[in-house]
Image (cartoon, rainbow, N blue to C red):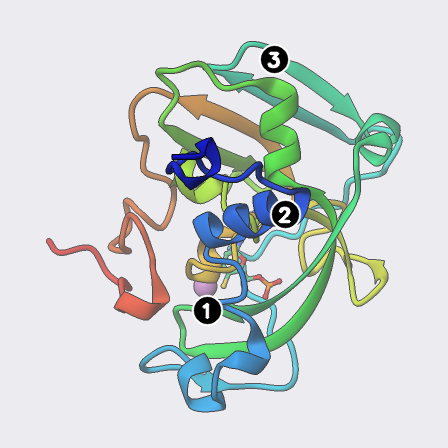
Amino acid sequence: MADDDGDRPPEASKLTRTKQRWAQEGRLLTDRTARSEFDRLPPGQHLVRDWPVLDLGEQPEIALDTWRLTIDGAIEHPEILYWQTFQSLPQSAKTSDIHCVTSWSRYDNGWTGVATRDILDRVMPKAQARFVLLRSHDGYTTNITLDDFASPHAILAHSWAGEPLTRAHGGPLRLVVPHLYFWKSAKWLKRIEFLTRDAPGFWEVNGYHNRADPWLQQRYSDD
Ligand SMILES: Nc1nc2c(c(=O)[nH]1)N[C@H]1C(S)=C(S)[C@@H](COP(=O)(O)O)O[C@H]1N2
Ligand SMILES: [Mo]
């Protein structure tokens, strides 16, 4: 028998490796054109064309020259980023739908900023890191798992539709985690803390679900 009749796998081409990665990430499964409009709207949601503003009521104004982003906790490389440094990080553009727990959804929001995966590559979470707590300039907090933070669709966004995020929508910088209800997407982001134990945020201790998956209608906490 010749060697090439054996079951040695063929040398993976670059394209093959890319496609394997896509399969692992479920890429294209969420491709918008592959879903019907019906499948695209999570249960109990309705579509809006405007973009409502929702927050605790205080909309802090943060000048870019005093803006800082602290990244700390269970990571190898804690740091405080200045605006200029943040802008020098690899920039990504992502388009995603917003699903607010108050039942409005808004399609095709074009975000620009730094992918959370590029932040993770930079700060290197320790093996024990499992959760992320987001803190904002208005005192708001929200928590997500490290896995949710690492979603390939998640982004630290400074722009929307090609323009800087307005103050009302969380500028200079907000998180966008589109696969969870929008309250997980902290506006006016100030600090990203990596934790070994979960630490529920503002809405999570006020009756809302800890995970917040709109497709599973995880709106409210069980108790
Ligand atoms: N810092 C901060 N982030 C926040 C909030 C907030 O009150 N403060 N509200 C959350 C909620 S409940 C929603 S629905 C979205 C609303 O974002 P938008 O005003 O840009 O639509 O922001 C989320 N992020
Ligand atoms: Mo919300």
Tag 2 residue: 155
Mark nearest the camera among 2 and 1 is: 2
Quadrant placement of the N terminus? top left
Spot occupied by residue 78 in the image (x, y as percentages of width and height): 61, 13
Q: Secondary structure at mark 2?
A: strand
Distance from disc 1 to disc 3, alpha carbons, whole Å, reads 31 Å
Residue named by callout 1: 100
Provide the secondary structure element on which disc 1 rests: loop
Q: Which residue is mark 3?
A: 78
The amino acid type of the residue labelled 2 equals Ile
Q: Amino acid at mark 1?
A: Cys
**Cβ of mark 1 under 8 A from ligand 1:** yes
Q: Residues within 10 Å of mark 2 (few under 14, many from 20)?
A: many
The first of marks 1 and 3 along the sequence is 3
Q: CA distance from mark 2 to mark 3?
A: 19 Å
Amino acid bearing label 3: Pro
Is 142 on the left-hand or right-hand side of 164? left
Q: Is residue 106 above or below residue 81?
A: below
